[in-house]
Amino acid sequence: MDKVVASAAEAVADVRDGALLAVGGFGLSGVPEVLLGAVHETGVGGLGVVSNNCGAMERGLAVLLAAGRIARVTGSYIGANREFARRYLAGELEVELIPQGTLAERLRAGGAGIPAFYTPAGVGTQVADGGLPWRYDGAGGVAVASPPKEVREFDGRRYVLERGIRTDFALVRAAKGDRHGNLVFAKSARNFNPLAAMAGRITLAEVEQLVEPGEIDPDQVHLPGIFVQRVVALTPEQAADKQVERRTVAAPETAGRGRR
């Protein structure tokens, strides 16, 4: 039952070329930076990635992307990641963009053993009809396009069939975890992490605080340990290494202005 491994390198040692990874996080929040760094150190490539986005500010998945280790991304948006956009448009990367809520549910469904489900999101668009560019040819043309999906009517409304996602591995980050793999996520870091963890056949969790079994109130567990196979305890320095992707603060008021 003790799922703690000695290092991140040991946790990712069996990740091989061409593996499919589900990766938690959103922007820079809740990203398993240490595990991703360990994957980078192994030198594996041709990876498939399922994640909300593909890293930011040269951190997270952006490290693997810049090194040319990622072959395919299933995600929700490219955002401000210029290298992601460049590789996609140059035909160096296959990208399946899907609605964010659909991505979340596909991960959850896969983890729950549900092979597919119907959703209204995307009906009447290329998400359902097909034709979305998955890979460009580098000259402005489309080399691979998305296929059409099954659309069915229920109670007078149309729905598109989406498949659940299962991956070879899942990499997640939690604020707290015990030796049995029970995890607690902090605030906005509880984004795609629980869902990614559910989708992985082998789930690796880096935790900022490792505690003993029984120290986490069962009512406070966000993800049960049954979904987690390996736990990596971060050092205080690793746990504190967090950045803000985009600061949005008000300009300071003129000295004395507005004071009473």
Image (cartoon, rainbow, N blue to C red):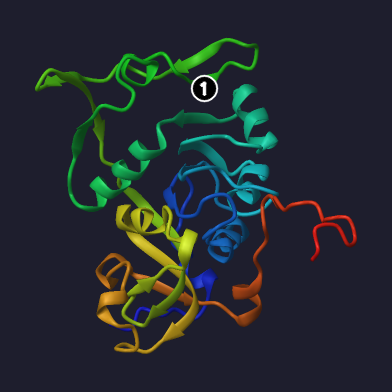
Q: Amino acid at mark 1?
A: Arg
* Residue 12 at x, y percent in the picture: 48, 64
7, 175: nearer the viewer? 175
Q: Helix, strand or loop at disc 1?
A: strand
Q: Residue at x 46, y 45 (%)?
A: 51
Q: Residue at x 58, y 62 (%)?
A: 33
Residue 227 relative to residue 74: left or right:
left
Q: Which residue is mark 1?
A: 135
Residue 243 relative to residue 11: left or right:
right
* Residue 127 at x, y percent in the picture: 37, 21
Q: Check the image and report above or below for 151 versus 104.
A: above
Q: Check the image and report above or below for 214 versus 118.
A: below
Q: Is residue 173 visible?
A: no
The single residue placed furthest to the front in the displayed view is 260
* Residue 238 at x, y percent in the picture: 63, 74
The single residue placed furthest to the left in the displayed view is 155
- Within-10-Å neighbours for mark 1: few <14, some 14–19, many 20+: many
Residue 203 relative to residue 54: left or right:
left
Q: Residue at x 62, y 11 (%)?
A: 140
- The count of marks equals 1
Q: Check the image and report above or below for 206 versus 236.
A: above
**What quarter of the picture does the N terminus occupy?**
bottom left
The single residue placed furthest to the right in the displayed view is 255
**What quarter of the picture does the C terminus occupy?**
bottom right
Name the quadrant containing residue 216: bottom left
Q: Check the image and report above or below for 24 versus 92.
A: below
Name the quadrant containing residue 15: bottom left
Q: Residue at x 67, y 61 (%)?
A: 243
Name the quadrant containing residue 119: top left
Q: Is residue 92 visible?
A: yes
